[in-house]
Image (cartoon, grey):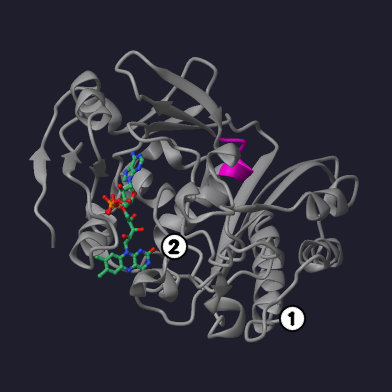
Amino acid sequence: MKNFEFARPTTEGEALELLAEGDAAVLAGGTDLVTLMKRELVTPERVVDVKEVEAWRGVAVDAEGGLVIGALTTLEDLLDSSLTIDHASLRDVADAVHAIQLQQTGTLGGDLCHLPNCWYFRNGEGLLGQRNGESLVAAGDNRYHAILGNAGPAKFVSASRFAPAAIAWNATVRVAGPNADQSEWMPLEYLYRTPNVEKQGVTILEPGQLVTHVRLAPRTGTTTSAAYEVLATTGLDWPLAAAACTLDVSGGVIRAANVVLGQVAPTPWVSREAAAALVGQSPNEATFERAADAAVAVATPLSKNEYKVQLARTAVKRALLRAVGENEGGLR
Ligand SMILES: Cc1cc2nc3c(=O)[nH]c(=O)nc-3n(C[C@H](O)[C@H](O)[C@H](O)COP(=O)(O)OP(=O)(O)OC[C@H]3O[C@@H](n4cnc5c(N)ncnc54)[C@H](O)[C@@H]3O)c2cc1C
């Protein structure tokens, strides 16, 4: 690991000042950043450990009934808070991280800004996994890579487990910095980008900026939500495909729907096709199968990951069934 300066601010102002200077990295739970630094995939001059910034921790409900979650909130805090009960899809995700240690240390902000688990990136071949301008991924072992949004040079999948559920709840995110008095709220969907060149990164965050809070829309009486992740093992693992949804059902008809897929594209993947297949229909298995088909109809699998198309379809269907409290069905 390369030498670095270490700082532990206690206020937002201090943290932003420390992040604004030089090449600095945000350390939250540190469960991934430390690994990245050990492998010298990330080599900051300064590590800013933000864990003591209390204003960025915890779950609260704002005046409009929105759920506001601090970026430092751990997965365990999310599960322990009675305030998250109405946003069931968030709890589905936190529950699916099968490791108590990670539930206690991993944070929401760390999950949302997690760098890809792509093995080309993790082995030092860069975010795009290219050598001499050629994609190692396209011709190589791409079994865990993107099946959607992969036409450009980026073929990794977004690692965030919470982003699909939060985006399905029309989440907004507060981005602070680079100056101490600068912050703005934006749709969480817009935080993510598919890089065309290496230095673009996986989010639109500029040096000195970080995520401080996420706000989920209030739950109305008729809205339900769920998330479903397809995991290869019952232990700690990254999903092979995932989906989250919100459904607003009244009078036996779906009035509004959001469907967002995870682990299938370089960003969380909002499926407007699936949502369109749901609205105006009754919430039953046949409708959900049509929506799942619509979600993957635009998939463009790589040479070794066609199997993920079926997994993504299954994830969408099961998330929808789970949202209306139905049996999640078989593997079809
Ligand atoms: C051995 C090991 C195995 C793991 N396996 C799995 C697994 O199988 N499945 C799984 O889901 N998780 C796994 N994880 C956990 C994974 O690291 C988590 O997803 C965790 O939520 C990351 O949160 P963190 O707070 O520890 O992030 P950190 O490691 O602190 O940060 C992660 C990244 O986000 C950036 N960052 C952190 N907070 C912010 C912020 N507020 N604003 C902007 N950028 C920020 C950091 O600079 C860094 O680049 C594993 C961890 C370890 C140590």
- Specify whether residue 253 is painted magenta: no
Ligand 1 lies in which image quarter?
A: bottom left
User: Which residue: 41% across, 48% down?
Assistant: 113
Q: Are marks 2 and 1 in contact (CB under 8 Å)?
A: no
Magenta stretch, residue numbers: 167-171
Query: Depth-wise, is mark 2 or mark 1 nearer the camera?
Result: 2
Q: Amino acid at mark 1?
A: Arg
The single residue placed furthest to the front in the displayed view is 132
* Badge 1 density bin: few <14, some 14–19, many ≥20, Cα 10 Å: few
Main SS of the magenta part reads loop
Distance from label 2 to label 1 (Cα)? 29 Å
Ligand 1 is within 8 Å of the C-beta of the residue at disc 2: no
| Direction from residue 293 to residue 75 in the image, left or right | left
Q: Amino acid at mark 2?
A: Pro
Determine which of the numbered discs, if any, sits on residue 207 in the image.
Answer: none
- The image position of residue 27, as x and y in percent, is 23, 45
- Specify whether residue 169 is painted magenta: yes
- Position of the N terminus, as image quadrant, is bottom left
- The image position of residue 150, as x and y in percent, is 66, 65
- The image position of residue 218, as x and y in percent, is 57, 29
User: Which comes sooner in the sequence, label 2 or label 1?
Assistant: 2
Circle 2 SS class: loop
- The image position of residue 85, as x and y in percent, is 47, 42
Q: Residue 135 lies in what quarter of the image?
A: bottom right
User: Which residue: 23% across, 29% down?
Assistant: 21
> Which residue was labeled with disc 1?
332
> Which residue was labeled with disc 2?
116
* Badge 2 density bin: few <14, some 14–19, many ≥20, Cα 10 Å: some
